[in-house]
Image (spheres, rainbow, N blue to C red):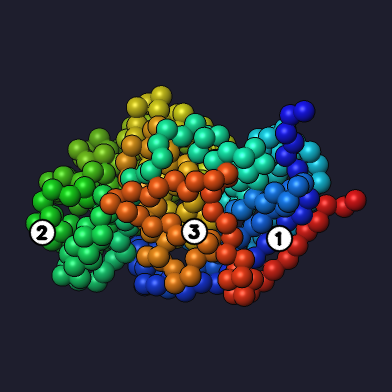
């Protein structure tokens, strides 16, 4: 008999975790993170874990934690609880009638893929077609406030072994830190991330950034724009990388066809989940565009998924899957996810290969609820 995917019950833990450092981007300053963790229980005691990447306020994308958890509890979970499905894709088809809300859907979908892979007793990376057992890791450094502090932070992270350094920039904080870091470290793989803080009127700034040999510049223009990115790409040599604009595989196809970017940052929550992430990967491969996995300050549950997904063949650039201990005093999983010599080893074992640090999660949860299938 073929295996069946079924969710008998779902537990939600909402955590409020302090970050170990102050993280500044063009959006603002972050010192803590609200983290939804979804635990699915299937027949035979199999468990699936998922972590939500939506935020308290709709800053990165439109979704919020409150809205996403409402949809999950009132609509998405009731639509699938207790029913048998052939696989995660078949289960998610039940949600096709609900428009949008990719981050809310992807939280359920992530836990479902983990449940499915654990039920099959295979690592998720194998199920997805992964080709490597360790993935290259870069680090994303927030805005430091001074050139000296920026250079020091870069040096510290290079010493730890990170293979690529990404600096967050914003108008007024771009050429100076880049020049300082480049002169201190002429040969490192260096990138910038503007998180949509600029317009085409700033094209001159990006033309000047060309001289610093950046690997790419990430999402300089509007989060929902492709046309202006294409106009900017025509005027500079540094490849643009699209992050916020890549909301699904169709957007990736349009972006690459327009030459609005030449590198794709995949965030599974932003594109709507693992299945759509696979389609984005397929599109990028068809265009010959490299991919890498972005981060949303995940704890271990989300980080483990990102590491598994980064094993796909097109992920040829280092991802934002830095060590969990860089962010959290205590993590949501028992297994340490630590970068060594510039790589994260893919957690072994079925599913995403990590187990929930249940004692910690229960102790620090600020809200908890459970939904059970009706019998
Ligand atoms: Mg980004």
Q: Is residue 208 above or below residue 251?
A: below
The residue at which mark 2 appears reads as: 184
Q: Position of residue 224 (x, y in %)?
A: 45, 46
Residue at 46% from the left image edge and 34% from the top image edge: 130
Count numbered badges in the picture.
Answer: 3
The tag earlier along the polypeptide, 1 or 2, is 1
The tag earlier along the polypeptide, 1 or 3, is 1
Residue at 33% from the left image edge and 48% from the top image edge: 343
* Disc 1 from disc 3: Cα separation: 21 Å
Which of the two discs, 3 and 2, sits closer to the camera? Answer: 3
Tag on residue 11? 1
49 and 247: which one is in front? 49
87 and 77: which one is in front? 87
Q: Name the side, left or right, on which 208 lies relative to 356.
A: left
* Disc 3 from disc 2: Cα separation: 36 Å
Classify mark 2: helix, strand or loop: helix
Which of the two discs, 1 and 2, sits closer to the camera? Answer: 1
Residue 304 seen in this snapshot: yes
């Amino acid at each position: 008999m073929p295996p069946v995917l079924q969710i008998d019950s779902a537990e939600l833990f909402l955590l409020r975790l302090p970050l170990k450092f102050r993280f500044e981007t063009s959006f603002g300053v972050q010192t803590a993170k609200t983290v939804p963790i979804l635990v699915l229980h299937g027949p035979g005691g199999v468990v699936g874990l998922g972590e939500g990447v939506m935020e308290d306020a709709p800053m990165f994308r439109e979704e919020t934690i409150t809205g996403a958890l409402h949809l999950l509890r009132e609509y998405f979970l009731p639509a699938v609880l207790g029913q048998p499905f052939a696989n995660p894709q078949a289960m998610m088809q039940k949600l096709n009638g609900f428009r949008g809300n990719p981050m809310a859907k992807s939280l359920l979908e992530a836990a479902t893929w983990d449940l499915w892979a654990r039920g099959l007793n295979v690592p998720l990376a194998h199920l997805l077609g992964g080709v490597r057992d360790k993935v290259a890791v870069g680090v994303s450094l927030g805005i430091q406030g001074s050139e000296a502090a920026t250079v020091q932070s870069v040096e510290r992270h290079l010493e730890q072994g990170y293979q690529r350094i990404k600096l967050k920039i914003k108008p007024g904080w771009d050429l100076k830190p880049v020049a300082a870091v480049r002169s201190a470290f002429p040969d490192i793989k260096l990138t910038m991330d503007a998180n949509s803080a600029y317009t085409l009127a700033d094209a001159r700034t990006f033309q000047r950034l060309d001289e610093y040999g950046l690997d790419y510049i990430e999402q300089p223009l509007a989060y929902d724009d492709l046309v202006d990115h294409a106009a900017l790409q025509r005027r500079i040599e540094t490849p643009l990388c699209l992050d916020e604009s890549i909301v699904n595989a169709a957007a990736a196809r349009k972006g690459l066809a327009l030459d609005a970017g030449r590198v794709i940052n995949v965030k599974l929550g932003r594109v709507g989940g693992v299945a759509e992430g696979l389609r984005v990967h397929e599109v990028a491969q068809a265009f010959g565009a490299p991919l890498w996995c972005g981060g949303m300050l995940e704890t271990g549950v989300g980080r483990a998924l990102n590491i598994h997904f980064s094993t796909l063949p097109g992920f040829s650039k280092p991802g934002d899957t830095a060590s969990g201990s860089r962010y959290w005093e205590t993590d949501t999983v028992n297994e340490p996810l630590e970068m060594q010599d510039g790589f994260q080893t893919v957690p072994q074992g079925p599913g995403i290969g990590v187990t929930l640090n249940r004692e910690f999660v229960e102790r620090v949860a600020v809200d908890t609820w459970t939904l059970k299938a009706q019998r």
